[in-house]
Image (cartoon, helix red, strand yellow):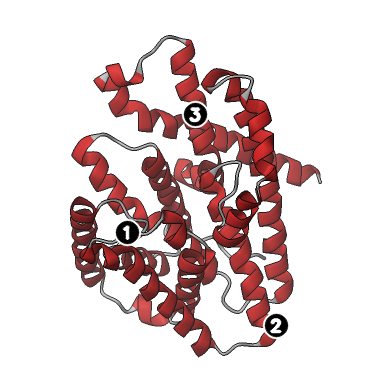
Amino acid sequence: MGAKRNATLELFKLIAAYMVVFIHVSFEGGFGIVVDSLARFAVPLFFLISGFFSYGITAPKIKKRIKNIAILIVFSSVLYTAVNLLLLPVEKDFSGIGAYFGMYLDIKIWLKLLLFNIPPSSLHLWYLFAALYVYLIYLFVKAVRFKEKTVFSAAVILLILHLMISEGLSLFGFSVPTLVVRNFVMMGLPFFGLGLMAKKYESKLRAVPNKTAVVLAVLGSAESVASYCFFGKKELYIGTLPVLLLLVVLFVKYSEAVYPRFVSALSGCSTYIYVLHIMTARLIKTAYTLFGIDLDASVILTSLHPLIVCAVTTLLSYLMLRINRSLHKKL
């Protein structure tokens, strides 16, 4: 019998997926700033959970995960290439088709993919490539039998370096390109490593009082919002860390919690929501244009737009999930 699913963790993954949607399809005004700054826990949580469930697993299981991610990368890349070509006549013109395929001949495109996980089909798919790199590195780490202490220390050092480069340099008026910190080295490896640590010290996390974790998360949230207001948008804030601590403490403590059936049904959609939301947002905006709807002219529509994207993306993701499960049953 397989291990029982951690429903709380699955719920947090779903919430994190929606937070990614709100980062890319943002709310207006001060509310949008608050949501954006608080949502920065989302991608780190994905990496952390991957690390949590990778602690102690065998090489064949790692290879299976690498295979699954590779399949998802191929599917996502083909999908977004098709969508990009489909929308060229609407968003640009037919002359853009040659330029679109021509960019694949540019060596810089491939260097960005190789070094910074920036795919040409859609920028948000960087996470999938970063996750692939992280698992390949973890497979190597297992093969050469690096000591846990070395792996954990490397994760902490990379995390500190990330914060110093991203948020720390802002104190002195410096800024760095997003791709420098949003990649497998600066984002993927440190939080994957923290996930390994979380599993290793799971019993200690269970002992953390809920009130302590909540207070730290509230303070961290305040720091994130303040940092956004003073220094601008960042991929990660120092305040994000206590928020992640709270979430880890909760999904460790309440691993056997039971939620309504519709929540359980939607929780399996988190990966598809991440993959599909950019496509959905573009198609919805195209629909606005085709029907003569001016998004910026309607305050109500502008306010509801992120929620509309979430709703449509959720529907498409649920359909994809059902199709995928149906195909697995037949195979």
Q: Which residue lies under the disc numbered 2? A: 143
Question: Which amino acid does the dot numbered 2 rest on?
Answer: Ala
**What kind of residue is marked 1?**
Ser
Q: Dot 2, crowdedness within 10 Å: few (<14), some or many (≥20)?
A: few
For label 2, the SS is helix
Q: Count the marks: how many?
A: 3
Nearer mark to the viewer, of 3 and 2: 3
User: Dividing the picture into quarters, in which one does residue 82 lie?
Assistant: top right
N-terminal label among 3 and 1: 1
Q: Residues within 10 Å of mark 1 (few under 14, many from 20)?
A: some
- Tell me which residue sits at (26%, 69%) in the image: 213
Question: Residue 161, relative to residue 50: is it above or below?
Answer: below
Residue 137 placement: quadrant: bottom right
Q: Nearer the viewer, mark 3 or mark 1?
A: 1
Which residue, given by chain and number where applicable, does mark 3 sit on?
282
Residue farthest along the top direction in this orientation: 292
How far across and how far down the image is residue 325, in percent? 68, 44
Who's the residue at 32% across and 27% down the image? 304
Q: Secondary structure at mark 1?
A: loop
Residue 25 to residue 51: above or below: above
Residue that carries the numbered disc 1 in the rendered image: 175
Left or right, 294 with reference to 327: left
Quote the CA–CA distance across marks 3 and 1.
Answer: 29 Å
Looking at the image, can residue 284 be seen?
yes
State how far apart marks 3 and 2 are (Cα): 43 Å
